[in-house]
Image (cartoon, rainbow, N blue to C red):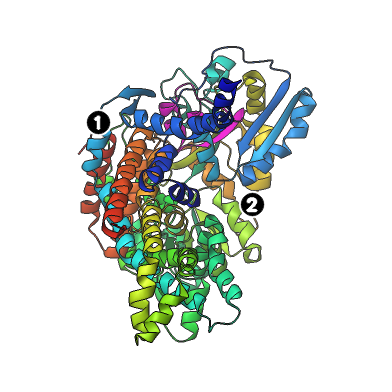
Amino acid sequence: MTLTRRDVLRTTGALAAGSGLTGLAACSGSGAGSGDNGSAGSPDRGEISVWSWAGPAAELRALLPAFNAQYPDIKVTVEDIGNPAIWDKITTGLAAGGAGLADVLHIGVDYLPGYVEKFPGGLADLSQLGADQYKDAFAQGLWATVSPTGKRVNALPWEANSAGFYYRADIFERAGVDVKSLDTWDDAIEAGKVVKAKTGTYLLGIDKPASVPDAANFFQLLLQLQGAFYFNLDGAITLDSAEAVKAMTIIKQLNDAGLVADASGGWNALISSIKAGTSAVLPYPTWFGGIIEETVPGEKGKWGVRLPPAVRRGGSTAATVNSTHLAIAGSSKHRAAAWKFVEFALTRPASQVKIYQEKGIAPALMKAYDDPVFHTPSEFFGGQQKAEVFLAALKAPSPAYNYSADYARALKVVTDAQTKVLLKGADPAEVLKQAADQLARQTGRKVVR
Amino acid sequence: MRAGRRLAPYAFALPALALFAAFKLYPILRSFVLSLHRSVDGADTFVGADNYVRLLHDPLFWTALKNTGVVLVIQVPVMLALATGLAVALNSRLLRARAVFRLGFFLPMVTGLVAYGVVFAVLLNEKYGLVNWLLQGIGSDAVPWLTDPLWAKISLALALTWHYTGYNAVILLARLQSVPAELYDAAAVDGAGPWRAFRHVTLPGLRPALLLTVVLSTIGTLQIFDEPWILTRGGPDNATLTIGVYLYQNAFSYFDFGYASAIAYALAVLIGLLGLVQFKVLGDTS
């Protein structure tokens, strides 16, 4: 802003400032990376860089001694770019035709389809490097995510997170509620009323004003428990389906009953609320168990974990709510060496077991679950076999979800709709219809009703 | 020899011109070309004025424009009135340690945009923020600074005022110091009190600086990005969505660079028009 002001001082003023701004949006290239042309480099030597964030970056780094014992001539540098900063950095790199990108990129399911669709060739086709052999190695639905056409393979799955229901066993006990008996979310609402009346604790927290995009996580969880999503597999909008209205109605009922704490303020606020014991339930996926353990180690034995209640009686309690993947930049000159690293990290059970032990990151690689570490009781979670709870969900039938290239836009209209429901008491069906129509206008996609 | 001498200035200007062309002119032209395209299956497809037509029918763009307009109409006048008052006070001969005050009020301008945005976000957090802690300490209710649509707008205005008032005050102060003291003496001889002297000597003297600050603040306001992005991400429910934030979302969250470029050009035209109007209305006609 200051720079523009100086420009203005030097010139007559107005138009120069406008030009500075137009330049801002101009940092997009045609979008195409260098694709898969040219040499992929040597599979046994080379220098490669890896972009990830926080915990996963540390865990990838921890694999390096073992990797280098096998591939001494491949030098790997793992960088912690931070999340969400990594998405902007990958976007700009892809938009610049791959310039400045790392060789290996850690990408969430929410960004992968957008990158693939908007920047064809930006990510390498891993089928050319031999990824196809691992087609059946991962949890259900994930191969369709990384290889939607069945031909190109855009990435290899890393973690597969199932919907979870972490709860404060001691609080439920004090309220005299048997958590195991909650079959549906309607049951959970009734139980929440008892918990609130007897202990003063909210049932769960939602980022009501949507201060961060993942404020819609709970809504999405309720949607996916019904096998539904924002788009169908053809890419049409299904945002105001009966399932979506039901999910938003549950949120409204919870809020109207005074059971929802406002968890605005992003990550730090969430951690503070866990420490303060604001909510009795954290409806978060697999990986969150490790975070709870780290945050409140003193509450060992007070926590429990189960799969979430079903949305409708007899409905599913299992849903793979998100996954992350390792992809290789199409512009990488060391694709073969990068592939060796990706293969080492993601298809070798020992690597995944080590990562799970350190950070609780749930592998997508099903063979990893043969290790006893996934079948031992957790002291923190009252002696429950936490990993087995989620393994059961991973084994349950799970549909593939189409995040599409417009997921970020969908998320925005959903969080706005949810905010209207939570802060202004809006009608779920109405706000979702508006959201679906708006998304259709923005994207040119059809709404299926 | 003579031709060489004639060409010399051009040769010296060439590096700067080349840099300007590469880093300013090219992006500006490129983004215009981009604004006429849409990404279809990863390929840029020419769509003519489609992005601009879409803009006219986009409720979120109008919301962003309205939000930005509200800041422009409410926050900017309040801030400039404060800055004028501050400049007059800082110019007063009655004030001791003037340099310290000047530094104090200008200091927020030096603070990095992101850093101060984060500090405000922390201070104004509804549950864990210092401001609400103090308010509750004196028996008041917690204020939903960033989580209620109206309060979020107020928070944004507060942050902007804190950051830019001192900056504007310094520009006004510089101008104020060039107003001849004789004019005040003459006004005093004519029996003008402080208010009359302010109205008939200070304000006319400040006119060029006021015009400058009004134009700069208008341009700055229309481009606001950092503060709403860090404080509220444009929320809740788009209450603090500004054109800058919407542009950024379209480019970097939705990868819709063509549409983002169209927004940028619409904004550039808007800024140009507003600037011209202000020059016409406030400018020195002589």
Chain that bears disc 2: A
Q: Is residue A301 left or right of residue A198?
A: right
Q: Are marks 2 and 1 on the same chain?
A: no
Q: Residue at x 52, y 31 (%)?
A: B17
- Residue A23 image label: none
Q: Residue at x 39, y 73 (%)?
A: B202
Query: What stretch of residues is rendered in magenta?
Result: A94-122
- Say which residue label 2 marks: A377
Q: Which mark is nearer the camera, 2 or 1? A: 1
Number of the label disc, if any, that sits on residue B49: 1
**Residue A241 showing in the rendered view:** no
Task: Give the alpha-carbon distance from disc 2 to disc 1, as whole Å.
Answer: 63 Å
Horizontal and vertical percent for residue A275?
57, 66
The residue at the point 64 percent across, 47 percent down is A359
Q: In front here: B244 or A166?
A: B244
Say what secondary structure mark 2 lies in: loop
